[in-house]
Image (tube, coloured by chain):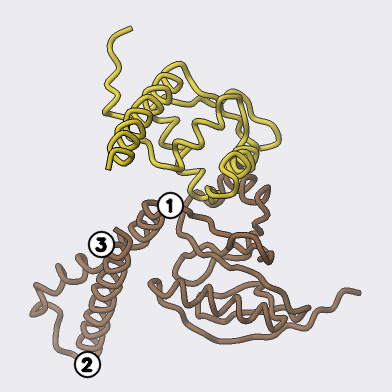
Chain colours: A yellow, B brown
Amino acid sequence: MGDIHYSKYLPLSEATFYVMLALNEPLHGYAIMQKVETMSGGSVTLGPGTLYGVFGTLEKQALIVKVAEEERRKVYALTELGRKVLAEQVRRLEVMVGNARALLSAS
Amino acid sequence: MNTKTLVRKYKLWLVWQDEQCEAWLQRMASQGLHLRSVNEFGMHVFEQGEPADVAYRLETRGDSFDPAYQRLLSDAGWEYVAVLSGGWHCWRHTITAGQPMPELFTDNADKRRKYWRALVPFALMAVLVLFNARDWRLWGTSPTQVAVGVLCMATGALCVYGAFKLGRRIAALS
């Protein structure tokens, strides 16, 4: 597999980041909304319109894939590429947080 | 037998007045008037019932009838109400005290896209009318032809104004 051009996908918006994080296990839309709300302690809520838009974009980019459809609920999962992109986003965020901590605690 | 009292109210909303319309429908619901349908001339039919705190949200998305999208919205507690004049799709959700206000879109980029989808037909219509207006001399001079010409120009002007108003909304969200 060739190099991945991460800049094509990053940085992820807050909504996209949390959707991908929730899709660590296959889930349908409403379950994602609930998981994200619980995970973030209520600080991130996803509207269904926004979530549906995120699905469309991520599916087109092949970062997620539909793995099942039950009673008109589409179940999505991260693809291999999706996992790599998410991991790279987390790595970059850690660099940013590390830099900020070092600078702000020094002053 | 199920007889519900219906209340009719006439009100014409223009496409860029979506937020005023949402607030108006919410006020109506707080008085026990729950929207049932709207015709293309702006006649709103309400069902008289218990006063309730209900959020109304309008959107333009053409795939409102995608079954998976509808399922997601109903799972999340949204109820489809009607398509309004101007092509807005109207959804509602009960407001619960202490919970965040229900929203279809929680990202400004999505709100911008919503207004872009509304803007495109206006911009096309405006261009079409103004393009036609180049040849206004060929339109004729009989009273009917002049009347049609004036009507066309008025439509074009309204479209230009609509596109301008929607453009302002998009800019404000950027």
Percent x, y of residue B18: 45, 71
For image coordinates 27% across by 21% down, the residue present is: A5
State how far apart marks 3 and 2 are (Cα): 28 Å
State how far apart marks 1 and 2 are (Cα): 51 Å
Which label was assigned to residue B143? 2
For mark 2, give the secondary structure.
helix
Q: Quadrant of the N terminus of chain A?
A: top left
Front one among B42 and B94: B94
Label 3 or label 2, whichever comes before in sequence order: 3
For image coordinates 25% across by 71% down, the residue present is: B164
State how far apart marks 3 and 1 are (Cα): 27 Å
Residue farthest to the front, as pictured: A106
For mark 1, give the secondary structure.
loop
Residue B95 found in image quarter: bottom right
Percent x, y of residue A57: 41, 36
Provide the residue designation for mark 1: B107
Q: Name the mark nearer the viewer: 1 or 2.
A: 1
Q: Amino acid at mark 3?
A: Leu
Front one among A56 and A10: A10
Provide the residue designation for mark 3: B124
